[in-house]
């Protein structure tokens, strides 16, 4: 595995490599460290996708990928504050897709400290209940399209969150929110009026309320699906 990692690091440093897609089709997914991949600077890589690997942290060198435009990272067990800062420092990043179980200490916060200065599209899949998400004032100033995938079954799944801060995304034009926990096939179903699931009603109303006060009046699309397994984030806190 170490030799493979070294080889990939050499690939990333290649002057002619613009796109790199790494996946694992085996039954068992093994954890992978990206620290040893450190590429030479400058790096020509523009698109990087890593799928079906457990990635324990975002490596510091990723912030130095000055030409990176598209980044897709899957199965990050914890999205740490340091990970958000490193990703936010990638200067040319336009498209970011992250799949993670949740945030450390049950929170994912995007600060308004001139991070994600170029980002226009964010897809964030928070796979396990119990994480509060917050976009702070000034965060992601050029973001136009936000796609959220959330798992909420009860109010405690939200870990005390009271506002996602979507209204702080000043360039926002479109929001898509997929909420797992309850499925309704009624074509007239409005999750903001859900009488059966308080959590779905709350998070949909919070997103809708933020959009209603947003000067751009972004478009919104909600989708819900059946998800009966309410696995609280603290249940996986023993992972490495």
Image: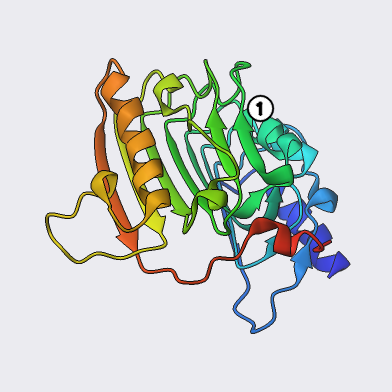
Residue placed furthest toward the bottom: 27
The residue positioned 73% from the left and 44% from the top of the image is: 105
Foreground residue among 11 and 48: 48
The residue positioned 77% from the left and 66% from the top of the image is: 31
Foreground residue among 24 and 124: 124
At mark 1, the secondary structure is loop
Q: Quadrant of residue 167?
A: top left
Where residue 204 appears, x then y in whole percent?
34, 43
Residue 175 appears in view: yes
The vertical placement of 226 against 119, above or below, is: below
Quadrant where the C terminus sits is bottom right
Where residue 171 appears, x then y in whole percent?
37, 20
Where residue 176 appears, x then y in whole percent?
33, 44
Q: Is residue 214 left or right of residue 40?
A: left
The residue positioned 24% from the left and 64% from the top of the image is: 184
Where residue 38 appears, x then y in whole percent?
80, 45
């Amino acid at each position: 595995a170490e030799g493979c990692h070294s080889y990939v690091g050499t690939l990333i440093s290649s002057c002619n490599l613009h796109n790199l897609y790494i996946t694992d089709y085996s039954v068992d997914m093994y954890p992978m460290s990206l620290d040893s991949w450190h590429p030479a600077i400058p790096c020509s890589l523009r698109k990087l996708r890593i799928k079906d690997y457990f990635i324990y942290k975002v490596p510091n060198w990723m912030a130095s990928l000055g030409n990176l435009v598209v980044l897709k990272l899957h199965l990050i067990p914890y999205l740490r504050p340091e990970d958000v800062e490193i990703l936010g420092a990638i200067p040319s990043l336009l498209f970011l897709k992250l799949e993670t179980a949740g945030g450390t200490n049950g929170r994912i916060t995007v600060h308004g400290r001139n991070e994600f200065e170029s980002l226009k599209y964010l897809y964030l899949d928070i796979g396990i209940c119990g994480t509060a998400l917050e976009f702070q004032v000034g965060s992601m100033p050029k973001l136009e399209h936000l796609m959220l995938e959330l798992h909420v079954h009860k109010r405690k799944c939200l870990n005390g969150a009271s506002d996602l801060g979507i209204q702080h995304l000043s360039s926002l034009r479109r929001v898509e929110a997929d909420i797992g926990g309850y499925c309704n096939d009624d074509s007239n179903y409005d999750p903001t009026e859900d009488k059966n699931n308080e959590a779905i009603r709350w998070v949909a109303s919070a997103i809708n309320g933020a959009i209603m006060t947003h000067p751009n009046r972004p478009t919104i699309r909600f989708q819900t699906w059946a998800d009966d397994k309410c696995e609280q984030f603290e249940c996986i806190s023993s992972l490495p």
